[in-house]
Every structure is written in structure tokens, then in C-alpha cells.
Image (cartoon, helix red, strand yellow):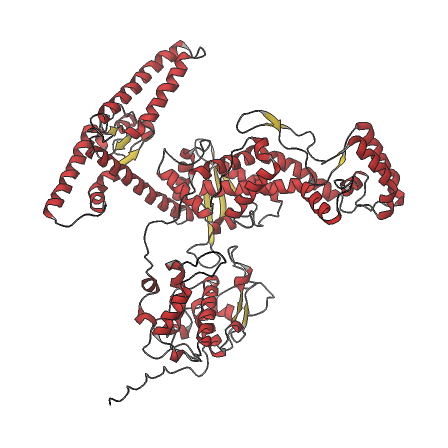
């Protein structure tokens, strides 16, 4: 019988932890507020609530680390040592670890690792394991398989979690091996490494550098959402802010008023007499307050009456029981005579409905709580516009503070609007100062939000940024109150909305101009110009990163358009325009290369990857115009550059494009509706008696050119074989 191999030797351990007696924050370089309690390594509860640099993405629970939740006391020390090593990778003891992570990890990241350690170590305890020396690869695989499944939900099947979620689980199991030289109480066997040292990404099959998986907000959701938010900010919002200022001023002035006592009953009767003489209704409570009162006390004739408002009209704060009983019969009599109605905006100013333009009061009469609720939803509209039209991440939206607006004049006139904030992602804990260049609509939305929230300078502007829930609540409020129909707003369909999705939507909208997805009222040209200035002004800022996303989306879109042009040409649907011959020759050359590759290479092409590589150079030359494609392969032939006197430019001047004459411009079937729309518009102008004869004479050649372009597009498309078009 063969003798059993000796057990692997245990790794030598430190007698005492390298971090014994240390102040955690001082060791990690984390700043605490003056007078805050120190966090010591030996404590089983680390409280970082007083961190000065904690940004607004950090949740309160992420600043309280409960090591006592780890059942095995030895493994609590293991978790502490690893987490402090992640926070302070330059500590002398950490530098001795050959495989330690050398970059600083933030407290948020370390908190997630603590959660993973707690789950992993307690699972081992449940399996009867008391030492990390006893951990095997089989145990790691069993635990990973169990964690691969979502938490059970009644009535729903469990699903496998995404690889990026599981990668963090694997990293937590591998960290004790990376810090083996540092650990003092316990550690893995010498030579053991979960999954033989493979990276966490490789273990779970996480592929980095792939396409952006964040979906854009569907157009059927985006268009009505933006139209609603623009209307709330531009039309309704100023009225809400003005009335809210009045209500707040009255509330501030009435804070120290006395109660209505026996001596003040005559003053109340004077108010009642004045209301009777003017035929003015008694003040009513807000809708939600009435609902709560009826649910608690039941209905009575004065359920809707705002007794507090009536007291303030008499120069007091609230009624005591005696005074209320004294005036109750008179109040009941007056209520039957003039009625009860909410006190604010009884004669509201008129505004135009969004759909019909009909003039309607901007609101029905409202109470204090109704007005505050309306203001909250207008702030939600401000948040949606800021996110959708700037491209900010959630962390950057949270860092916007009251007073963040920055505006400056630019040479030649005009104003550039900016928002000062902080860039969090990819930066040291707490972030770095940053600024976004935005358009006027965003500046207006932020200014309105500052008025509505009424917070001190430097306070958070938007608070939470849970857009999905906030948009859902906005949709429900519009329907519940009838304000959507009153203002003539479109129905906002159900659908997810988040800052990441809105950021992706904006990137695609700019990249795919002129056929963007944003509402027609928003000039994408101005968005593009303003954001471009942001990229140039702060090359390392977050807006620069957004530009990189936009550029990648633009390249992908141009490749799709070029591939479609190639497929159309294969089907016999040729382009039209002065540059059609050159484009057709280029596409035929690619087709010949493709055929040659198919003849000489026996492999079967299962996708368009080889074709895309052949078309890539042509796609990079494509510039999309509003009614044509510009294949900018030779600057010397570009009509726009010759007209502008800039023959050495590296990009065409699409705004100066005369696609009917430029030798690099082509027209395609997808652009035919644009030219038809031009013809329809010109026909309407020619038939209008308000247009001068001289202007009509100028429009006739424009119409003839558009007709000629449409005819050329139809003629080129008609060359396709039967059944191909």
C-alpha cells in the first residue's frame, strides 16, 4: 500500500497583527470631522459616519461595519486585516505581500467585500469548517454555485446572477490567499489558491471591453416624458415657484402667532363677516389631508375646513377647544352659504395647454400640501431634464448643490451655462471638482429646482436620484389629480428610466444626428456645441468621458449605415446624387474583395465581421447630413470647404452642404421623406398670399432641385430586381 502524501505545510503566521493598536482612519488616510470618535483596529464595529470626504452616493449603512456578524472570531480579524490592507496599500506590512492589490480601494468597495466575507465565512462555519487551512476547491465551487442564484421570490422562478455580480464573490474568496503573509489569526494552506489563481473574471466568464449593454430609453417613453417635463419646467414651474414663495412667506410670518382663545373670538367673527360680505368660500384642506382625516374621524360637514388657515386669517395660529366651540355654529352657517374651497390660486393665471394651445388656469385651487406636492413633482421634472440633456451619471447628479450654476459670456455674444459639481467615478474617495457645460434648458431647470427646494447654499439640490420611482410617481400624480388632461399633456407609458439609460440615449441621439430621439423642441445642435466646449475646457473631466461614449456610438451608427448602403447596392438599390458613382465603385471593390475571400478561404462566414472590416475605412469617411450622406474621402473635392475657403480642414462643414452639387454627397431611400417634406413646405409657401412675390421666385428653383433629387432617388431605387425593393 502506497503511503499517503504528507499534508501541505501551513503558512507561518504573524504572532501579532501588523495593525494592532492602529487608528484605522489615520492609517488609511481617511479624514474624520473634528471631535469624531476614533476607529481602532481591535474594535468589532467600525463607524465611519463622520468621514469628511464621503460623497453623496455613500449610504449611511455603508459607513457602519459590523465585524461581529462573522461568527468565527478568528475570521473577524482576517476580514479586518484584509480590508485595512485594501484601504492602506502603502502600509509597510502590506508592501511585504507579493500579491497584494497596490491601488487604494474606497470604503464603499471595502464594505461590499465585508458583506462577501461575512456570507463566505459564515457558510464555512455552517459546513463545520473552523480553519481556512481546511478550505478546498470543491467547497469554493459549491459555494459559488449556491450564490449564483437570486434570492427566492414567491411566485417567481429563481434566476442566475450576472457574471459581474458573481465576480465580486470570487474575489472575496481569493483575497485571503493574496494577503497570506499579512494574516495573523488564520489563512489558507501554503500553495492553495481558489481556481488555481485564475482571475475572478475568468472564473465567472465575465468579458470586459464588450459593447455597452445599457439600453436607451424607448422613444415611445422618452418623447412624452420629455414633453411633459419641459412643460412643467417652462410653463407650470414658474407659477408654482411664485405661489410657493407667497405661501412660505406667510408661514414664516405666522410662526410666533398666539392661539385662538376666548379673547380672539371677535377677530374670528370679523373674518367670517368679511368672507360673507365678499361671497368668498371658507378655506379648505388639501386633498390628501382630507382623505386622512376622513379615514381617521369619519366625514362631517366641516371635514374639508382648514381650521388652521382660518385661525391665521384672524391673526392666530390654531384654535383651542373653547374658541372652536364658540364659533362652530357661525362657521357651519357660513359654509352652507358660501361653501368651502382650497385657498390658493383661486384666480390662477391662464396658460396655454400643451396640445391645443387653449388658455386654461394653470391650476385649480390648491391647499398648502397640494402646492408642496406639486412643487416636488416639478423638481422631479427638473431632475429628468438635467439628466436627459446633460448626460450626467447618478453620482454626478447627486453632487449638484444649491448654487452650482455657473454662467459666463463667450466671445461674439451669448452665454455658456455650466454646473459645478464633483467627479466621483474613477477618482480618489470623495471625488474631484468638475464642471459640466450644459444648455439653457438645463440651466433653467436647475434654477427652478433651487427656488423650489429652498435649501441653503451648498446643500444637495435633488436629494435622491431614483428616477424610475420618481417618474412612476409623477405619472401617477398627473393621472390621479387630472392635471395631465387639464394641461393637455401626453400619456407617459410604463417603462424603465434611469440616469444611465438617459445618458446612453443622449449619446446615441447626438451620435445619430440628425435623426436623434429627443423632443423636437430641443435643439441637438446646441447640445452638441455646448458639450463639445465642455470636452475642450476640461480634457480630463466627466464630460470628456461622455464624449468618448458618444464617439463610439457614432462610429457604430456609421458602420450600420455603410453596411446598409452595401446591402442595398447588392440588391440593386443604388444611391443617387453627384457622389453616387464614386460610392458605387467603392462598394463594388469591397464586394469583389469579399468574393475573392470566399473563393480562396474555405471557411464559412457566419456574420458580417469580415465585411465590416472591409467597410471600416469607408464608414470612417461618412458624415451624416439632414438629407444626404457625405463620403468625405478627399477634402479637395468637398464643395463646402471650397465655399468656406478652408480646403485643409479635416471634417466637412455639413451645415454648408449643397448635396445636389457636391461630388462626395449621395442621396438614399431613407432620405426621400426629407426631400418630400421640403417640397410640401415650399408648395405651402408658394400658395400662401402672405409670401412676397420675390420670395416665391427664389423658392421655385429650390423646389425644382428637391423634385430632381426625389426623381433621382426613385430612378436609382427602381434599378433593383423585382422583389428586392
Question: Where does residue 69 sit, x and y in percent of width and height?
Answer: 52, 72
Residue 531 figure quarter: top left
Residue 83 figure quarter: bottom left
Which residue sits furthest front?
155
The answer to whether residue 278 is above or below residue 495 is: above
Q: Is residue 296 visible?
A: yes
Q: Quadrant location of the C terminus? A: top left
Residues 718 and 632: in front is 718
Residue at 67% x, 43% y is 288
Question: Where does residue 423 sit, x and y in percent of width and height?
Answer: 45, 52
The answer to whether residue 677 is above or below residue 392 is: above
Which residue sits furthest left?
600
Q: Is residue 621 visible?
A: no
Question: Where does residue 317 sit, x and y in percent of width and height?
Answer: 79, 45
Question: Where does residue 222 sit, x and y in percent of width and height?
Answer: 46, 39
Q: Quadrant location of the N terminus? A: bottom left
Residues 130 and 454: in front is 130
Is residue 675 rendered to the left or right of residue 31? left
The answer to whether residue 39 is above or below residue 351 is: below
Residues 1 and 225: in front is 1
Residues 3 and 546: in front is 3
Is residue 92 rendered to the left or right of residue 329? left
Q: How many marks?
A: 0
Is residue 564 rendered to the left or right of residue 131? left
Is residue 482 rendered to the left or right of residue 669? right
Residue at 86% x, 38% y is 329
Amino acid at each position: 500500500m502506497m503511503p499517503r502524501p504528507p499534508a501541505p505545510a501551513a503558512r507561518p503566521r504573524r504572532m501579532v497583527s501588523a495593525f494592532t493598536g492602529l487608528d484605522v482612519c489615520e492609517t488609511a488616510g481617511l479624514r474624520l470631522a473634528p471631535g469624531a470618535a476614533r476607529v481602532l483596529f481591535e474594535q468589532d464595529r467600525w463607524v465611519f459616519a463622520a468621514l469628511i470626504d464621503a460623497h453623496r452616493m455613500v449610504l449611511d449603512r455603508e459607513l457602519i461595519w459590523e465585524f461581529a456578524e462573522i461568527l468565527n472570531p478568528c475570521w473577524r480579524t482576517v476580514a479586518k486585516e484584509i480590508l485595512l490592507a485594501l484601504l492602506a496599500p502603502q502600509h509597510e506590512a502590506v508592501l511585504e505581500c507579493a500579491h497584494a492589490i497596490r491601488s487604494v480601494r474606497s470604503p464603499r468597495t471595502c464594505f461590499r467585500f465585508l458583506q462577501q466575507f461575512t456570507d463566505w465565512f459564515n457558510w464555512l462555519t455552517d459546513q463545520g469548517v473552523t480553519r481556512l487551512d481546511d478550505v478546498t476547491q470543491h467547497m469554493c465551487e459549491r459555494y459559488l454555485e449556491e450564490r449564483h442564484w437570486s434570492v427566492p421570490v414567491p411566485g417567481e422562478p429563481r434566476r442566475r446572477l450576472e457574471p459581474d455580480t458573481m465576480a465580486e464573490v470570487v474575489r472575496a474568496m481569493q483575497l485571503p490567499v493574496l494577503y497570506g503573509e499579512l494574516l495573523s489569526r488564520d489563512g489558507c494552506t501554503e500553495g492553495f489558491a481558489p481556481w488555481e489563481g485564475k482571475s475572478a473574471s475568468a472564473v465567472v466568464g465575465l468579458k470586459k471591453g464588450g459593447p455597452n449593454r445599457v439600453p436607451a430609453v424607448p422613444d415611445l417613453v422618452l418623447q412624452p416624458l420629455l414633453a411633459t417635463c419641459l412643460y412643467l419646467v417652462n410653463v407650470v414651474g414658474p407659477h408654482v415657484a411664485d405661489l410657493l414663495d407667497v405661501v412660505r412667506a406667510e408661514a414664516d410670518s405666522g410662526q410666533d402667532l398666539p392661539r385662538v382663545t376666548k379673547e380672539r373670538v371677535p377677530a374670528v367673527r370679523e373674518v367670517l363677516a368679511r368672507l360673507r360680505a365678499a361671497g368668498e368660500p371658507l378655506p379648505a384642506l388639501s386633498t390628501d389631508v382630507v382623505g386622512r382625516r376622513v379615514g381617521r374621524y369619519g366625514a362631517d360637514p366641516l371635514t374639508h375646513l382648514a381650521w388652521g388657515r382660518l385661525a391665521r386669517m384672524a391673526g392666530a395660529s390654531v384654535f383651542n377647544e373653547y374658541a372652536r366651540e364658540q364659533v362652530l355654529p357661525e362657521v357651519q352657517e357660513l359654509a352652507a352659504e358660501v361653501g368651502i374651497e382650497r385657498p390658493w390660486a383661486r384666480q390662477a393665471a391662464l396658460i396655454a395647454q400643451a396640445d391645443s394651445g387653449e388658455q386654461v388656469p394653470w391650476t385649480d385651487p390648491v391647499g398648502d400640501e397640494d402646492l408642496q406636492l406639486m412643487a416636488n413633482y416639478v423638481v422631479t421634472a427638473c431632475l429628468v431634464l438635467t439628466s436627459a440633456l446633460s448626460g450626467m451619471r447618478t453620482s454626478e447628479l447627486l453632487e449638484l448643490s444649491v448654487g452650482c450654476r455657473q454662467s459666463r459670456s463667450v466671445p461674439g455674444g451669448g452665454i455658456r451655462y455650466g454646473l459645478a459639481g464633483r467627479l466621483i467615478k474613477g477618482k480618489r474617495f470623495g471625488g474631484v471638482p468638475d464642471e459640466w457645460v450644459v444648455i439653457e434648458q438645463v440651466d433653467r431647470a436647475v434654477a427652478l429646482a433651487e427656488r423650489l427646494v429652498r435649501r441653503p447654499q451648498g446643500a444637495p439640490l435633488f436629494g435622491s436620484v431614483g428616477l424610475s420611482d420618481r417618474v412612476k410617481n409623477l405619472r401617477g400624480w398627473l393621472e390621479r389629480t387630472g392635471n395631465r388632461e387639464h394641461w393637455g399633456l401626453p400619456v407617459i407609458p410604463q417603462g424603465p428610466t434611469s440616469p444611465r439609460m438617459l445618458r446612453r440615449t443622449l449619446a446615441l441621439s447626438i451620435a445619430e444626428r440628425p435623426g436623434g430621439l429627443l423632443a423636437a423642441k430641443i435643439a441637438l445642435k446646441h447640445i452638441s456645441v455646448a458639450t463639445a466646449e465642455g470636452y475642450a475646457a476640461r480634457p480630463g473631466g466627466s464630460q470628456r468621458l461622455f464624449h468618448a461614449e458618444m464617439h463610439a456610438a457614432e462610429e457604430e451608427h456609421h458602420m450600420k449605415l455603410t453596411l446598409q448602403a452595401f446591402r442595398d447596392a447588392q440588391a440593386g438599390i443604388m444611391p443617387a446624387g453627384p457622389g453616387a458613382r464614386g460610392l458605387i465603385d467603392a462598394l463594388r471593390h469591397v464586394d469583389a474583395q469579399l468574393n475573392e475571400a470566399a473563393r480562396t478561404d474555405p471557411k464559412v462566414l457566419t456574420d458580417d465581421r469580415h465585411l465590416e472590416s472591409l467597410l471600416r475605412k469607408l464608414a470612417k469617411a461618412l458624415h451624416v447630413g439632414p438629407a444626404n450622406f457625405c463620403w468625405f474621402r478627399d477634402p479637395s473635392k468637398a464643395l463646402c470647404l471650397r465655399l468656406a475657403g478652408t480646403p485643409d480642414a479635416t471634417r466637412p462643414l455639413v451645415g454648408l452642404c449643397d448635396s445636389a452639387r457636391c461630388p462626395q454627397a449621395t442621396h438614399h431611400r431613407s432620405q426621400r421623406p426629407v426631400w418630400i417634406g421640403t417640397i410640401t413646405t415650399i408648395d405651402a409657401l408658394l400658395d400662401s398670399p402672405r409670401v412676397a412675390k420675390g420670395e416665391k421666385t427664389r423658392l421655385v428653383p429650390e423646389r425644382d432641385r428637391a423634385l430632381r433629387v426625389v426623381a433621382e432617388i426613385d430612378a436609382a431605387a427602381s434599378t433593383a430586381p423585382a422583389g428586392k425593393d
